[in-house]
Amino acid sequence: MAQIITYLTFAGNCREAMEFYRGCLGGTLEFQTIGESPLAGSMPQEMRDCILHSTLTRGALKIMGSDMVGERGLIRGNSVSLILDCNAEDELRACFARLSDGGTVTHELEVTFWGALFGDLTDRYGNQWLLHFDKAKNTPVS
């Protein structure tokens, strides 16, 4: 089965943002700068430290990012959100608190009509997160 991976584009602060996400979510983080790539010779000197590609991996979770913004510049919209489907309520609450630091909570955590603990926020980098924990599905059977 194919996998959908979230790819985020930043305007010079990819390293900072991806390190923030690693601090919030855990995992292994890898970077490749433009200066470390075959593109180095064809790019302006001031872009050598910019991130060409980064990957944050924790189990099945994978988020990728780059500072490679197209000619039109970085355009933020509300058509893409990152859904973090947690395995435990305490995991959801901890991630929600860390991701919302410096951002804006748009929907406080609450138990929904479908039985999940759910909330959403926009982080300090302008990315939208939907955090979800299915209480019914993850309740141990006695």
Image (tube, rainbow, N blue to C red):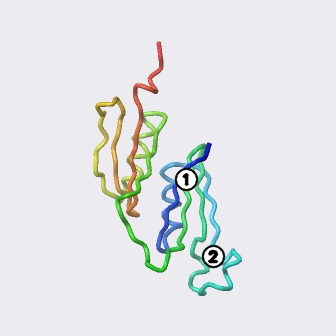
The reply, left or right, for residue 136 in relation to residue 38 is left
Classify the position of the N terminus by image quarter.
top right
Given the image, on which type of amino acid does mark 2 rest? Ile
Q: Are dots 1 and 2 in contact, CB under 8 Å?
A: no
Residue pictured at 50% horizontal, 66% vertical: 16
Name the spot of residue 72 as percent of width and height, x first. 44, 78
Give the residue type that dot 1 points to. Answer: Ile
Q: Is residue 24 left or right of residue 123?
A: right
**Upstream in the sequence, badge 1 or badge 2?**
1
| Furthest residue toward right | 38
Residue 124: x and y, percent?
38, 62
From the viewer's perspective, is 45 left or right of 140? right
Return the residue at label 2: 34
In this rendering, is residue 125 above or below 118? below
- Please name the residue shown 36% across and 64% down the image: 77
Total marks placed: 2
- Looking at the picture, tell me which residue is in the foreground, 104 or 11: 11
Mark 2 is surrounded, within 10 Å at the Cα level, by few (under 14), some (14 to 19) or many (20 or more) other residues, namely many
Q: Residue at x 44, y 77 (%)?
A: 73
Q: Is residue 135 left or right of residue 19?
A: left
Q: x and y percent of residue 63 in the render? A: 54, 55
Q: Which residue is mark 1?
A: 5
The alpha-carbon separation of the residues under discs 1 and 2 comes to 22 Å
Q: Secondary structure at mark 1?
A: loop
